[in-house]
Amino acid sequence: MVILLASPNASVAMMNVINKCWRENPNWRNHQQQLAMCSVGFVGKMTNNIGKSVIRYKVTDPSDDPLNPKLGTLRHGATMIKGIVWITFKRNIHITLRRPLLIRSFTAIDGRGVDVHITSTGCLLVYQATNVIIHGLSIHHCKSQPPSFVMGPDSKLITLGQMDGDAIKLGTTRKVWIDHNTLNQDKAVLLGHDDGHLRDGNMMATIIFNHFRPNCNQRMPRVRHGLVHVANNLYQGWEQYAIGGSMSPSIKSQANFFFAPKLGNKEVTWRQSSHADKASWKFYSMGDVFENGASFNTQTGLGGAKPNYYHE
């Protein structure tokens, strides 16, 4: 696998496998759901996010009301609409969330063609959900959040616990594809509710073609339980670690570009484990590129992270 960060004007032949898949169609803006068939990694194809019943929703309003989401806002589309929802954006937009954004099942947030920035408290939360696509967003300056309430699916008030300020957090999820996003903050992606949440053992996520900028210090991602494929991402340094985990997850790091910080820790990985569960870890590098002294020294279970990378 080759790392290619394609620009909008790049020829199709030079694009990465995902961009090539949808950009070959010059009329892609009228067929945006084709993106779901371009997914690769542990999640396979996101076929449950497409079909004749899909509701197309366009974000036109940058405001955010966590308790009464208004039509036209991102929160209304991501949380309040029943069924299969494909969210796009009318124009370049900067959304300042007042509380974490709860994303329901069968939702695609598609930032292609515009410049979408999401900031402030908590940022994106995928909880008790499946079949979610997060594509083409810039997420930064997310802050920690004390316990709070937000309006959830079916117009039910949802109690949220303490949020650490991750750009994206997953808990009790099954099939999530996080692709072509730019993240630039301390804590980037947290996968898994907590160490005792055994249901996250069913989690399956693909983190692919994302750009972790220099302000990302940790959790790119941090994984509890589950199967996670981390592939073709660009890492421009870290402070604590890039990829870490606990509770014996299965993590395949494949064809990522790791550029270690000039000073400090150059080891990519971090793990929290006991001697008892050490043997059950599957945490390894395959075809990664290491620059500026970066290292991946804690490989276990080589070849054991399944399923394999899907090229088709």
Image (cartoon, helix red, strand yellow):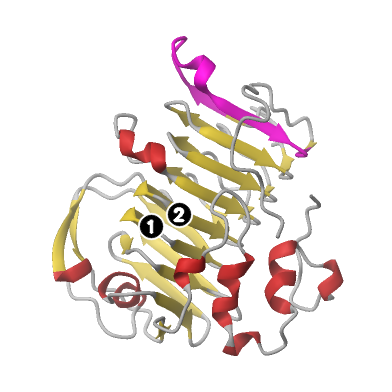
Image quadrant containing the C terminus: bottom right
Q: Is residue 246 left or right of residue 105?
A: right
Q: Classify residue 87 by image quadrant.
A: bottom left
Does 63 sit above or below residue 299? below
Mark 1 and mark 2 in contact? Answer it, CB < 8 Å.
yes
**Horizontal and vertical percent position of residue 20:** 75, 71
Q: Secondary structure at mark 1?
A: loop
Amino acid tagged 2: Lys
Does 72 sit above or below residue 172? below
Q: CA distance from mark 1 to mark 2?
A: 5 Å
Amino acid tagged 1: Thr
Boundaries of the magenta span: 270-289
Q: What label does residue 130 carry, if any?
A: 1
**Horizontal and vertical percent position of residue 95:** 41, 72
Q: Which residue is mark 2?
A: 175
Q: Classify residue 190 by image quadrant.
A: top left
